[in-house]
Amino acid sequence: MSGSLNIRRILTVVMSILLGVVVYYFYLPALNLRSLEGLYFIWFIITLILVITFPNIPTNNSILIRIVAIVGGFLLILLLAVVSGPLIQTSAYQSLIDIEEGDFKNEVASNNIDEIAVVDVATAQRLGDRTIASLKNSSWYDVDDEYNLILYKGKQYRISPLTYGGFFKYLSASSSGIPGYVLVDAITQEATLVQTEKPIYYSPSASFFNKLSRHLRIQYPFYVLGKSFFEIDEDGNPYWVTSVKNPKVGFCGGFTEDSFIITDATTGESQEVSTDELPSWIDHAFDLAYLMKLVNYNYEYIHGYFNFSKTDVNQTTYESRDENFDGYNTTISSDGIVFYSGVTPANASNSITGFVFANPRTGKVKFYPATGANESSAQTAAQGLVQDLKYTATFPIIVNIDGNPTYFMTLKDQSGLIQRYAFSNVENYSITVQAFTLEEALDSYRKEMGGSTASESDTNEVSSTTGQITNIYTAEIDGYTYFYFTLASDNNLYMSSIENSNRQVLLQVGTNVTIKFTPSSESGVCLVQEISF
């Protein structure tokens, strides 16, 4: 009898271990006593052993000891979470990040026309999805929806890796791997499928031991890992950059990202580096959600945890977002790629006190004071200019136009195509303009602001010419009349809005005109600023 009891005991222990291995395989907790996920996993394993091991000892003392051990373990973990949380450690959480105050006019470079990224994530998704049609076995793959903004060879791109289309497609494609990634030029909207020299074998969309999170867990079983970003070096080789989190408050609270694991997406080789050791080609290391959480701790706990009147409390628009309001975007600053979010008073969400730039490479956050309307108000103002056309405005990005903090948006039709460009002044969102081209929108904005226009700025030097019209055409674009004509004196195509002069309806072949113009982003096409004849 004792022999069979021992066998049952051994079998139940083996079953507990096997069940624990299965849970570990899928859950992948860090085996770290200073992380809640690690503590709960260890508690779960102990609970399994206590519940299903030695079932044939029905003594009251044995049952009571097991219940006390299980409940006591859970309560101990809960206590550690509470004493390490913001309720007890409010001041420590409030000081987890230092937010510097910056000077927008002097620290954020003024944007030129050819530096404004017009491609948002949704546009990049629409453009990028079309690139894999020509790929062999394209049905095996999808394109990830993230499309982070990066600087690559001096240009702005949105990048997204290809992913496996599902578990069964992974089984078909795993031997050949993922063939590459998609680059979308953030200025020209050109989307390109880049096929890497060697396939990508390690990916979040892979299964078994090629799944990135499982691969990293095997290499670093005790690390608490954060978000993984897809990056490419200057030669276009693919890598994953994953943050490592360490507790800074109490026993298991206040995690900060202090180092990063760079993983070769082809070979799976990994190395850990500090923030200062990050290669120059990495644009995204710190997670946006992590940075914004620290910023909101800093704002929310300025006067302690119990501040029911919300005195001096601010919040980011990232924190107050809903499903129709992203609350952030990426843009270019003098420090490179930055996440941007407005900062609003806790009780006045339609206005901002300024905005924060969070650098995903350095983890540094700067606050720029600027009173005015928040992003959703600017979107509403821009959409109001084209309400008859039912265009929708993208979430704004902040740009520096002649020292003025300015919201920039694109206006899209119901198909998601960019139809107009809009600028809105942060401090006075009644100054909101839109136009068919980026150049025209910027020119109109500068006129409204009472400053130099695009045609008068150094970035688009005004030119003048006189000549005889050889060809002329008219077009109606979103309710506006445009005149397109060529001159005998050169090979340019000139585009002139009816707003330049109502007398343009009299233009015909053979008319001599004198015009002032600037070049557009399209080669050989010039925008007429003034016309006389």
Image (cartoon, helix red, strand yellow):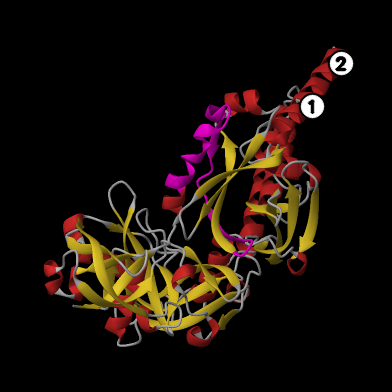
Residue for badge 2? 2
Image location (x, y in percent) of residue 131: 50, 40
Q: Position of residue 172 (x, y in %)?
A: 63, 23
Residue 13: image tag = 1
Instruction: Pick whichever, 107 or 493, lies toward us.
Output: 493
Closer to the camera in the image, 436 or 381: 436
Q: Is residue 403 left or right of residue 238?
A: left
Q: What residue is at 32 percent from the left and 70 percent from the top?
A: 527
Label 1 sits on what residue type?
A: Val
Q: CA distance from mark 2 to mark 1?
A: 17 Å
* Residue 83 is a magenta residue: no
Judged from the image, the secondary structure of the residue bearing numbered disc 2 is helix
Q: Quadrant of the C terminus?
A: bottom left
SS state under label 1 = helix
- Indicate the position of residue 40 as horizontal and vertical percent values: 67, 46
Corner quadrant of residue 318: bottom left
Q: Of the residues under marks 2 and 1, which one precedes in the sequence? A: 2
Label 2 is placed on what type of residue?
A: Ser
Nearer to me, 497 or 57: 497
Circle 1 Cα neighbour tier, 10 Å, few/some/many (<14 / 14–19 / ≥20)? some
**Residue under the image location 68 percent in, 33 percent down:** 177
- The part of the chain drawn in magenta is 125-154
